[in-house]
Image (cartoon, rainbow, N blue to C red):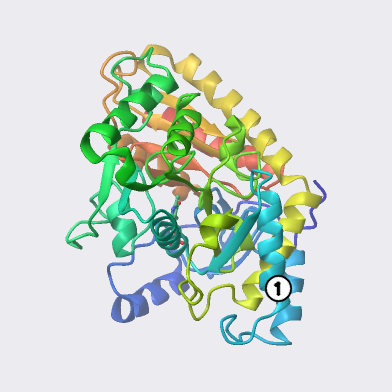
């Protein structure tokens, strides 16, 4: 990795925060912004680069969240910034459905090339992850002439009506927002840490889900099965080996469209371009967003040409989908991922983090609140349980998790939590973060865990 940082890569907290400027903005916000939008951090951003976020009062935070896995190449990757500036001076928008442009076509070509599988592919671009998921379902229904869609326990697919229906967790995502779209069915996930039978294989966990599909829906009624190959909001759950391949195989046998939702896990995050590649799974459709464009809003559905081309002309689109500035940013971000070997970088981060927390877990022993350490690449998580329950009931400890995240924030490290039980800390650093800054942030996290344990 050969990264020139614009901002000094150093954590620095000047005193109590939020400081006066952040407090002033918070007061304005309270009068202007809907209170249904919550923020993890109480300070307001002035600048961000590499693994650092500066607030308006001069504090510098280590960024272990990347704005939820978005700024994989950093918040101001020079290539992305240059491409955006260049594009913005020519045209900001024409609407691809009215007057098309090369950037959209080039992003589609790139995605067709990078996604797994040697078959003929097509891509269509949108703005958000939820919009990509909605359209993947539209495409699957149009191509199969079937209605039912199968999603999994702990799934997260977005906040629009259909994607809320696909999402598992009620609070805060669905509570009070129903009714949801019909013909969505939920089946059990493979969650190795919380299986009743700890010896269950991935294939057996898949058969458990497939039996429900056959008995409760009927395989011939199912248009699509949608799954995050590493679940995001649900707790960074990596299904047992063999689970994804068996689900994909079943889909193929039954004419069901297998959709991999790689909105969070895609684009070098897990150490491969896409998380399905860890098990050699080739999805029929793949949804991407978040890390795709260095922070610019862009999303995509990529997949088998015969599926995407089954939709009538004019059936897919949207005013802003594949915005030219976002497309320019995506081409630059993907180029940076490639030239800086950010997939290798993700694996490097994985090795550092897993080694360190496995050591801590062993040291703290049986009484440890560390239940599980898991993830792929730089999509890593620690699941916390009540003291003494790690070897027995594995009782989720959301309270301890909150305290650990709060401790980190107070010390200047931005950390996100997740999980159905709210007891998971997830690490999603920008892949361009340097070893020294990463180590400093992990020191803080380790101290936080020790203090709470
Ligand atoms: C974030 C996310 C979405 C929704 O993306 P938005 O851009 O917030 O609409 C969908 N699926 C997964 C797996 C996600 O992590």
**Residue 95 falls in image quadrant:** bottom right
Q: Is 390 located above or below residue 146 in the figure? A: above
Mark 1 burial class by Cα count in 10 Å: few <14, some 14-19, many 20+: many
**Residue 369 falls in image quadrant:** top left
The residue that label 1 is drawn on is: 103
Image quadrant, ligand 1: bottom left
**Residue 251 falls in image quadrant:** top left
Is residue 251 or residue 366 the one in the foreground? 251
Is residue 273 or residue 30 the one in the foreground? 273
> Residue at left 52%, top 78%?
320
Residue 76 coordinates in the image, percent (x, y): 68, 65
> Residue at left 69%, top 80%?
101
Whether residue 92 can be seen here: yes
Q: Is 97 located above or below residue 303 in the figure? A: below
Residue 261 coordinates in the image, percent (x, y): 48, 49
Residue 19 coordinates in the image, percent (x, y): 46, 66
Query: Is 159 situated left or right of 123 in this image?
Result: left
Q: Is 364 located above or below residue 167 in the figure? A: above
Is residue 351 or residue 272 the one in the foreground? 272
Residue 381 coordinates in the image, percent (x, y): 47, 35
Quarter placement of the C terminus: top left
Is residue 326 or residue 385 the one in the foreground? 326
> Which element carries disc 1, helix, strand or loop?
helix
> Residue at left 77%, top 65%?
79
Whether residue 55 can be seen here: no
Query: Is 207 situated left or right of 297 in this image?
Result: left
> Residue at left 29%, top 46%?
168
């Amino acid at each position: 990795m050969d990264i020139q940082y614009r901002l000094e890569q150093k954590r620095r907290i000047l005193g109590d925060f939020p400081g006066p400027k952040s407090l002033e903005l918070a007061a304005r916000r309270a009068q202007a912004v809907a209170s249904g939008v919550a923020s993890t951090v109480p300070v307001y951003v002035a600048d961000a680069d590499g693994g650092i976020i500066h607030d308006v009062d001069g504090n510098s935070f280590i960024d272990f969240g990347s704005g939820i896995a978005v700024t994989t190449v950093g918040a101001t990757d020079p290539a992305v910034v240059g491409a955006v500036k260049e594009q913005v001076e020519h045209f900001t928008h024409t609407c691809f459905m009215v007057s098309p442009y090369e950037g959209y076509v080039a992003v589609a070509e790139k995605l067709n090339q990078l996604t797994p599988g040697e078959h003929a592919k097509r891509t269509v671009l949108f703005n958000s992850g939820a919009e990509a998921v909605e359209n993947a379902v539209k495409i699957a229904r149009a191509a199969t002439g079937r209605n039912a869609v199968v999603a999994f326990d702990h799934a997260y697919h977005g906040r629009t009506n259909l994607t809320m229906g696909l999402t598992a967790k009620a609070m805060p995502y669905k509570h009070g927002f129903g009714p949801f779209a019909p013909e969505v069915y939920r089946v059990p996930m493979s969650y190795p840490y919380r299986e009743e039978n700890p010896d269950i294989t991935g294939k057996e966990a898949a058969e458990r889900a497939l039996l429900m599909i056959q008995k409760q829906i009927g395989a011939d009624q199912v248009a699509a099965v949608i799954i995050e190959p590493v679940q995001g909001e649900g707790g960074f759950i990596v299904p047992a080996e063999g689970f994804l391949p068996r689900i994909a195989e079943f889909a193929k046998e039954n004419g069901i469209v297998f959709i991999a939702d790689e909105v969070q896990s895609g684009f070098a995050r897990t150490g491969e371009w896409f998380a399905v590649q860890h098990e050699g799974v080739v999805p029929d459709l793949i949804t991407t967003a978040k890390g795709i464009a260095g922070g610019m809003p862009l999303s995509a559905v990529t997949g088998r040409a015969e599926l995407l081309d089954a939709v009538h002309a004019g059936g897919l689109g949207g005013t802003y989908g594949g915005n030219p500035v976002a497309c320019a940013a995506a081409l630059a971000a993907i180029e940076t991922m490639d030239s800086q070997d950010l997939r290798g970088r993700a694996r490097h981060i994985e090795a550092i983090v897993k080694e360190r927390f496995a050591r801590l877990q062993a040291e703290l022993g049986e009484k440890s609140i560390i239940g599980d350490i898991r993830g792929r690449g730089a999509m890593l998580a620690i699941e916390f349980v009540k003291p003494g329950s790690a070897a027995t009931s594995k009782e989720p400890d959301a309270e301890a998790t909150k305290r650990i995240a709060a401790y980190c924030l107070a010390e200047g490290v931005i950390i996100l939590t997740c999980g159905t039980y709210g007891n998971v800390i997830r690490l999603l650093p920008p892949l361009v973060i340097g070893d020294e800054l990463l180590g400093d942030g992990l020191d803080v996290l380790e101290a936080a865990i020790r203090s709470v344990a």
